[in-house]
Structures are given as structure tokens and as C-alpha cells.
Image (cartoon, helix red, strand yellow):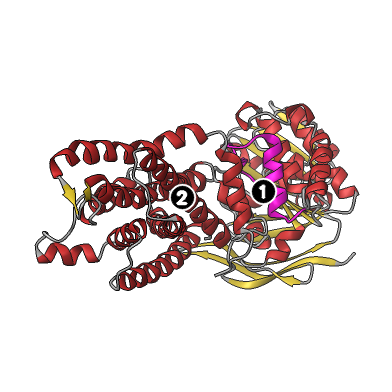
Amino acid sequence: MAGVISATNLVKQYKALTAVDGISFVINEGECFGFLGPNGAGKTTTIRMVHCVSPITSGSITVFGQRAHIDNRSIKMMTGVIPQEITLDVDLTVYENLRVFAYFFDIPKAEARKRIDELLSFVELDAKRNSKISELSTGMKRRLLIARALLNKPRLIIADEPTTGLDPQARHLIWQRLRLLKRQGTTLILTTQYMEEAQQLCDRIVVMYEGRILREGAPSRLIEDEIGREVVEIRISKDEDTRLVSELADVACGHERAGDTLYFYCKDGKGLMRKVVEMNLPNVLNRPATLEDVFLKLTGRSLIE
Amino acid sequence: MNLSYRIFYVFLRNLISYKRFVVPTLIVSIGQPLFYLLTFGIGLGAYMGSFGGKPYLHFLVPGVLVSSVMLSASFECLYGTFVKVVHERLYDSLVATPVSAEDAVAGDIAWGAFRGLIGGVLMLGVAVVMGIFPASVVSVVLLLVLMVFVGVLFGSLAMIVTSFAPNFDFFNYYTELVITPMLFFSGVFFPLDRFPEWMKTFALFLPLTHAVNISRAAFAGQVAPGLAVDFLVLVALEVAAFYTGIRLMKRRLIE
């Protein structure tokens, strides 16, 4: 697979704040690449520089062989953006929203009509064709944003937290649509705070924190490397930490204390669990390791404001 | 300046959304100038006798015409644009398409000018109904061109204000301290001849003064050499305001 998007030493500075602090990455054609990170990690700022709506302070990005910058219309021509916020045109109907965007992309009249019909059925909004935006549910609005992002048949789709605020049904529908697009060969960039979403959709992810990339890799690989296969959670007072950690040292490969819980990470939970059961500890949970564990381990379990 | 033909697409977007507001906005854009014509023109005009051999309304109409363009274009690029930028976040999705920030802002200025033109044409219609006719067809064409010109000028000036307005209330400074005084100091309602010198000098700095001079001459079909100055001042201001308005709005939109 060939790298179609690459960023080198990318920096974004807003006055005193460094939002993106010298990151580099390469995204291959046809893959789904995820940016994970807590609020303010720099995910949205990074992708805004990729699709040429935010000026780059230093470093560079190339998208399909072209250098990204604020006035690059041809990158925008090939890119579909599903924004984090619902930026639909509330003065227009569902159909008109798409019609106006078709103008923006210079799509000829007959072709625009055809694509709008196809897209409305793709996102299951045919029945809402002439509705006002205020008459749509949040899930419908998100689907319309997807349809809008696909009007120009983009080679690259950028989805910035596309399922925020949706119920499980709506979320699964959007995941299915995004997977379908990926199967058709579209390159996808996704930012998300939902680990399940990243595991469902992404071939590779980076975990961002305070403007830097902490880790990069396939979700399963990252879990294996950072956490192991299983996690044992013990809800127990902090005073017991030293005793437990030394007693379980030979069966666990790592541990972490967060609030009322002590977490043990291990390649195989069986040995650890046997010992924990022998010790007769209360409130113990043994479960498979998830991306969420990686995320929390890397970005900290405390609240990020 | 990254401008392109896509300005027209932004204009078109405004036109499509306009069909839902067309009735209320027509009423608003005709209401205020009509009120000036009736109260000043007929009410006050009854006491004024004639102005240069014609009834007062003949003096008043050309001035009110360009003022109504000024008001419509200004309000569109203040409140209209602010809603689209801040409340509806419309520009955020616009600049992610091949439409540049400059195209978007210029499209809104063009739209403001169009709204001004509608306001002006409605006024012209009212004047004709009241029996006040422009001198000739050439006069009408000149007036239409002037209206578009004045619309772009005041749309651009409003865009400069919108570029740093934190909220709606901020626009009051501009409308109450700039637009309203301009209406009274630019020779719309009475000639500037009898003003003290300093006030005449002050009026020269108001763009509306020059627009009113040209409008009055075009309406009456009387060309005078002084108009060249008015024209040059307007062109210079228009170019500067258009450029500055777009630059400043771009700074607000792209960070």
C-alpha cells in the first residue's frame, strides 16, 4: 500500500497555545486511520490542517501528492468532511442542503440530481427529502452530514467524531456506512473518543495527548503491547497496594492505581486470578484488555478539563 | 485575495434560502424609507415650498433611494452574515469545500448589494407611484448601477464591523453612531449649503454624501463637473472597503 497522506514535523501554534507539537504520520491509500485522544489533544486541529481549513504553523502535509495549505482548492475538491458539529444549513431543506453543496463542487446539474437521489437513499433519508433541518433527529442530521460529505465522490473522507451524541442504532448505521465506503477503496481519517468505534473501524490508530503522538499501531497490536491480554481490577484501599503488588509481582506484568481501583495487566489472567482467589480478595473483576485500557494508561485516568 | 467564480455559488445559496424570507424582508426594506418619504416628503414638504423650482419630494427621493440601499446592504452584512458565521456555523462547512473564505465573504457582500438593489428598486417604484419620475431611461440605468455600487460599498463596510463583532449588541455602535448620523449629515433630507463650514467639511468624509450627490444628478439628468470627485471618492472607498472587509473576515474565519 502506498502512503497517500503524510505529515512531517507538523506544528500548530495558537498564540500561547501549542495545539499540535511536531507530529509526523503516514496514511496509506484505502485504510482507516484513527486519531484518538482526550479533549484538547490536538486531533481536530491536525485533521483541519490536512483538509486545508487551518493554516500550518510549521512542518508540512502532503495529500495525494499535493502540499496542503489554506488556499489549496484541489485537495478540498477530493476530500469529504464529516464535521464534529452539525453545520447543516438550517435555512434550507434536506434536498437544498445537498443541492447547494453540489454547486460548491462544480457538479453539473443532471449529475447532481442523480447523486443526491443515490445519497439520500444511501443514508436512508429519502422520506425526509423536503423536510426542514429542524425537523430531523440528531441521527438524521449526522446521516445528512455524511451524504453531504460524499457528494463530490471523495478519495479521502475525514470524519471528526461522527457519532457523538447518537443512540446505538444510529451509531451502528453510521459505522456500517463508513465500512462500506472503506470497502469501496476510500481512504478514511477518523477522530474519536469512543474506543469501541476505533476498534470497529480503524486499521491503525495514533493516540494523541497534549499535541503529541504517544503511540501508533493497529488497535489489537497496541493493546497487546501496552496492556497484554487481560486486566484484573481490584477495588481495594490504597494502603494495600504495596503488599498486593509484591505478592502478585511474578504473575502480573504491570499495575496502575486509579481512584478506588488497582489495575493489573497481564498476558494471561489465569495465574493472576488463581492467586487473587487464594488471597480471598473482595470486588475482583477479570476481563479482556481493551483499547480503552491503552487509552487510559497512556493519557492518564484522571479527569482532563 | 483568493477569489473565484464561486462567489456566485454563495450568492445562489443566499438566493435559495431567501425564498422563505422574501415577504417579511420586502416589508422591512420598504418600510423605513417609505416612512421617511411620507413624513418628510409630504408632511414636511407642505411647509417647504419648492426646491430649485420643484416640489420637495423631487429633492428627497434620490437621497432616500441611496439611503435605503445603504440600510439594506448594511443590515444584511451585519446581522445576516453574523448569524451565518457565528450562530449557524455555515462558513465552517463552506470553507471545507473548494469555496474559499474570500469567495464566501465576497458572495455575502454581493448578496448584501443585491438586497440593497431590491430595496432601492422598491423605493423607485414607490416614488413613481407618488408621481416622481427620473428624468429619462438613461437616468434609471444610472441609478440602478449606482445602487449596486452603493450596496457593495456599504456591504463591505458592514463586513469590516462584522469581522470583529463579538455579539449582536456590538452592531448598535455602528448603526447608531455611524449609519444613523450619516443619514442626517449627507444631504438626504436637506441641502448642505447652509451648514457651517466645519459641518460641510465633515459631510465630505461621509461616503453617503457622495452617493447622494450622484443619485440626485442622475435622477434629474443633470451632469456637473463636481460629480467626478464624488465618483472618484466612492471608487477609492469601495476598493479599500471591499479589500479590507474580506481580509478581516478571513482572519475571523481561518485560524
Any magenta on residue A84?
yes
Q: Nearer the viewer, residue B101 or A260?
A: B101
Q: CA distance from mark 2 to mark 1?
A: 62 Å
Look at the numbered disc 2 and give the secondary structure of its residue: helix
Identity of the amino acid at label 2? Leu
A75 relative to B118, above or below = below
Compared to residue B5, the image places residue B19 above or below, namely above
Q: Is residue B67 above or below residue A283?
A: below
SS of the residue at dot 1?
helix
User: Where residue A16 appears, x then y in whole percent?
Assistant: 45, 64
User: In screen coordinates, is B180 left or right of A60?
Assistant: left
Quarter of the image with the N terminus of chain A is: bottom right
Q: Are marks 2 and 1 on the same chain?
A: no
Can residue B92 be seen?
no
Mark 2 or mark 1, which is nearer to you?
2
> Disc number at residue B117?
2
The residue sitting at 66% across, 57% down in the picture is A47
Return the residue at label 1: A297
User: At x 66% / y 37%, what residue is drawn?
Assistant: A164
The crowd level at tag 2 (other Cα within 10 Å; few <14, some 14-19, many 20+) is: many
Chain part drawn in magenta: A83-107
